[in-house]
Amino acid sequence: MRTAFLFLLPSAAFGRLLPQQFRLPAHVSGLDVDCPCDDASLCDVLSSQVDTELFGFGADNFADGPGFDWDAMTTIAWGSGADLICKAHSENVRVIAAASPPLTDNQTAIDEFIHSTIKSMQQNFYDGITFDWESPVDSPEDPLNTYYLDVVSQTTAALKAVNPDYQVSLCAAWSPFGIDGRWYDYVGLAAAVDFLYVMCYDVRSQIFDQCVASANSPINLCKKGIEEFNAAGISNDKLVLGMPWYGYRYECVNEDFDVESSSTCEIAQVPFRGVNCSDAAGSEIAFGSIRNIVRTYDAEVRRDPYMNVPFFNYVDSTSLKTYQIWYDDADSLQGHYDYVREQGLRGAGPYRFDQVDLDSDDGVEEAKEMFAALKTAAD
Ligand SMILES: *[C@@H]1O[C@H](CO)[C@@H](O)[C@H](O)[C@H]1NC(C)=O
Ligand SMILES: *[C@@H]1O[C@H](CO)[C@@H](O)[C@H](O)[C@H]1NC(C)=O
């Protein structure tokens, strides 16, 4: 182990590099941080460029064994811990942190946030950050939109001034047009950061048609969302298409529901942001856990012929409730990956990488299929 000496320059040295408003607090001087990796160069910020981002979240179950495919990842968001950093960097995979900025025009608070973000990058050997604010705003004119764009812009400029290799992204709804009240300034935000991670999942967060269980990430809606970003003026090289490696379990409340044969599963009306029916009626379950339910119950998995998305019914042996689960597998997500490749999007990747089951032989085989399909986005 070697000691990496990291140094935050006094604010004067940043005069020409940082936005005018940005001032590092005067008390900051040198930081001594031990590089936890055997090879201290593994603590450096990654500088390698990729043609296609394979960008996803989570690596809580990463392991050296089979199933977790480092060639199918370029960036892991929300990863943490020295073991992950050293391993990921040895595989040329970035690890980036979450960022929760203050939404205010109080420059002191913004400066404090930027300062603590840079410090966290340096102390934890991160390669960047991803913003993921998801609260509703009143309209495109809501002042919160201006605050958000301002703090994102300032933070990105400050990080790039410290090291141009820091990667900055921002999570976007599946369409730019007010999904769940998220009327953010996506054009400004896309220009301010390296790219948007378009979260094409939870698309039934507000159900305006029949209140029934259905797909979490139907490819036709993902395409429509990307086209709407394009229509708003955001090009494909700024867009990473995010897809779920998890599904939804819904309790079916229609009395005539037949677990063997029914396909229409009516769900309880659980409102979300002003709409009476939503996927909040269900619960999110990891892909690996869903496949284990299929095996435990020997459930018959069917596919919706229009969307090519798998679903199945079962009666839970404990609660005796009847459920329908909709999820995505390597086959249903292949359409997403093909689309990303054919349209030249910036990349693709899941929420989350670690929702595969690496504890069973079947789980490992299915994890390999999930990663193999993801890789085709970059072919
Ligand atoms: C601005 O933020 C700083 C730091 O969080 C805080 O101490 C100060 O009270 C805030 N100023 C106003 C006017 O709210
Ligand atoms: C939503 O549910 C409430 C309570 O049942 C009802 O009063 C309201 O009319 C419903 N709204 C819509 C748009 O259906």
Image (spheres, rainbow, N blue to C red):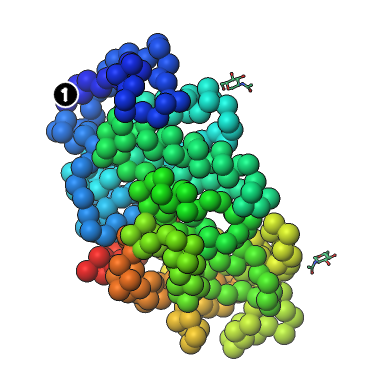
Picture coordinates of residue 295, whole percent (x, y): 44, 73
* Quadrant of the rendered image containing residue 318: bottom right
In the rendered image, the quadrant that contains the C terminus is bottom left
Ligand 1, by image quadrant, is top right
The residue shown at (69%, 59%) is 272
Picture coordinates of residue 203, whole percent (x, y): 56, 66
Counting other residues with Cα less than 10 Å from the Cα at mark 1, is it few (<14), some (14-19), or many (20 or more)? few
Q: Residue furthest top?
A: 27
Assign a secondary structure to mark 1: loop
In the rendered image, the quadrant that contains the N terminus is top left
Q: Nearer the viewer, residue 23 or 377?
A: 23
The residue shown at (42%, 55%) is 197
Which residue is tagged 1?
A: 2
The residue shown at (35%, 48%) is 194
The residue shown at (39%, 38%) is 156
**Type of amino acid under label 1:** Arg
Name the side, left or right, on which 176 lies relative to 28: right
Above or below, 230 relative to 104: below
Residue 170 visible in the shown view? yes
Q: How many marks?
A: 1
Picture coordinates of residue 216, whole percent (x, y): 52, 69
Residue 359 visible in the shown view? no
* Quadrant of the rendered image containing residue 245: bottom left
Picture coordinates of residue 322, whole percent (x, y): 64, 74
Q: Nearer the viewer, residue 69 or 116?
A: 116
Ligand 1 under 8 Å from disc 1 Cβ: no
Name the side, left or right, on which 280 lies relative to 59: right
Above or below, 125 relative to 225: above
